[in-house]
């Protein structure tokens, strides 16, 4: 059914319902490209327990709606990241975790390192080198608010 065919009040309700449901089932691709990876493990572990927010890392890109680029992104790896992004179904979101994928961090003058937003559109940037697990959780909360507003 096309969104335009849904009556006004029902459309608003469905927008809220779909946004709410989607925001509580963010499934990131389990992809780490640099030394921020232990922080991602921390977030997935029992202490920070990201599953309590409905965030569930998955091994297959075809099930996932969040691509987390965790750590330094080399030019060689960037092609694989783009391929994984293209395999993900719509709607999909990208989170850049750490200063390296955001602005190259300590590798700012390296020819071999690229920014995440040179390869894929980034929705949320998580600062830090490496970011604390709380910062990654906060990044998900920011993304969740964005997803909630998307609606149908
Ligand atoms: S942001 Fe810091 S910890 Fe993360 S990949 Fe870059 S250098 Fe490593």
Image (cartoon, helix red, strand yellow):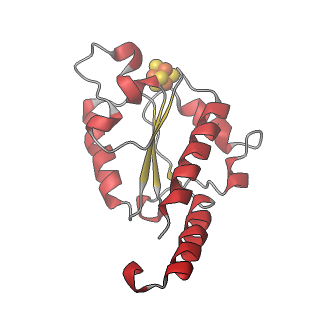
Residue 132: x and y in percent read 63, 27
Task: Identify the residue at horizontal 38%, vertical 80% (top origin).
Answer: 4
| Res 92 → quadrant | bottom left
Vertical side of 109 occupied by 80: above or below: below
The N terminus appears in which quarter of the rendering?
bottom left
Task: Identify the residue at horizontal 59%, vertical 68% (top origin).
Answer: 16
Residue reaching furthest to the left: 111
Residue reaching furthest to the right: 47
Residue reaching furthest to the front: 8
Q: Is residue 138 left or right of residue 75?
A: right
| Res 3 → quadrant | bottom left
Residue 37: x and y in percent read 54, 33
Q: Is residue 48 left or right of residue 140?
A: right
Residue 11: x and y in percent read 51, 77
* Pick the front one: 19 or 56: 19
| Res 122 → quadrant | top left
């Amino acid at each position: 059914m096309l969104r335009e065919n849904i009556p006004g009040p029902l459309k608003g309700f469905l927008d809220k319902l779909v946004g709410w449901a989607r925001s509580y089932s963010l499934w990131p691709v389990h992809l780490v490209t640099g030394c921020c990876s232990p922080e991602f493990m921390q977030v997935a572990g029992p202490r920070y327990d990201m599953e309590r927010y409905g965030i569930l890392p998955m091994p297959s890109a075809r099930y996932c709606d969040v691509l987390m680029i965790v750590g330094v992104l080399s030019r060689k790896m960037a092609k694989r990241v783009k391929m994984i992004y293209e395999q993900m179904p719509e709607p999909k979101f990208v989170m850049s975790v750490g200063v390296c994928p955001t602005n190259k961090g300590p590798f700012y003058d390296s020819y071999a390192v690229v920014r995440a937003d040179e390869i894929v559109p980034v929705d949320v940037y998580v600062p830090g080198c490496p970011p604390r697990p709380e910062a990654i959780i906060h990044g998900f909360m920011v993304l969740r608010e964005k997803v909630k507003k998307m609606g149908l």
